[in-house]
Image (tube, rainbow, N blue to C red):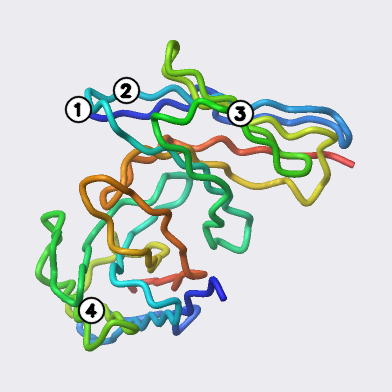
Amino acid sequence: AQKVTQAQTEISVVEKEDVTLDCVYETRDTTYYLFWYKQPPSGELVFLIRRNSFDEQNEISGRYSWNFQKSTSSFNFTITASQVVDSAVYFCALGAQKLVFGQGTRLTINP
Amino acid sequence: DTEVTQTPKHLVMGMTNKKSLKCEQHMGHRAMYWYKQKAKKPPELMFVYSYEKLSINESVPSRFSPECPNSSLLNLHLHALQPEDSALYLCASSQASDRRIRYEQYFGPGTRLTVT
């Protein structure tokens, strides 16, 4: 069975702080894909990143970075120098046609 | 252009009404999806179309009827819904996945449905 756990239900930080969102997954597949999505209050899920199981290289995109560690089955997401516009619910997901979502982490960035 | 459009944005319907939700994408994607999302929950997959054919139905009640008229359009026909069906309905599209490669899905803004 496939499962994604986002243990942090809600996180609240002050603007400019760094924040890390945790994601732990379970799968028996040797080849798999992981995703992060952002859902702002408007409701639309915004695709952030896709990573396959053979690529453990960390990725940085502006203030966003992702740390993928197969040894601990984790795919954590860090926002550096957070901004109010980063406030949203963030979902980690596993799979493909059938995406298995975590429960989401609600991130609030306070001015 | 990574855009999926959905209409209407909001819909209020009675339990005896028939209505339809519409979704459109022009990214050349051959897989399209319907999700249902309740408040403070992750999206739940309802249906998947691949190359205009229904490939996955997650045991959705028959009062929800999907339709894929062509590769760019996806409809969800609603009939005799219940108040508990009130939710955000999200459409998504992606390149068609195969056994080797899984592609990201691009989501529309959703239709917020209220059943009275």
| Residue B98: percent from left, percent from top | 23, 53
Indicate which disc, 2 or 1, sits on the residue closer to the N terminus. Answer: 1
| Residue A2 figure quarter | top left
Amino acid type shown at disc 3:
Asn
State yes or no: discs 2 and 3 in contact (Cβ < 8 Å).
no
Amino acid type shown at disc 2:
Glu
Kindly report which numbered mark, 3 or 4, lies closer to the viewer in this rendering: 3
Regarding mark 4 in the picture, which secondary structure is present there? Answer: strand
Vertical relation: A101 (above or below) A54? below
Which residue is more in the foreground, B45 or B26? B26
Q: Which residue is mark 4?
A: B78
Q: Let me know if marks 3 and 4 both belong to one chain.
A: no
| Residue A13: percent from left, percent from top | 79, 30
User: Which residue is pictured at 26% across the width and 78% down the height?
Assistant: B76
- Label 2, residues with CA under 10 Å away: few <14, some 14-19, many ≥20: few
Which residue is more in the foreground, B28 or B16? B28
Indicate which disc, 3 or 1, sits on the residue closer to the N terminus. Answer: 1
Regarding mark 3 in the picture, which secondary structure is present there? Answer: loop
State yes or no: discs 2 and 1 in contact (Cβ < 8 Å).
yes
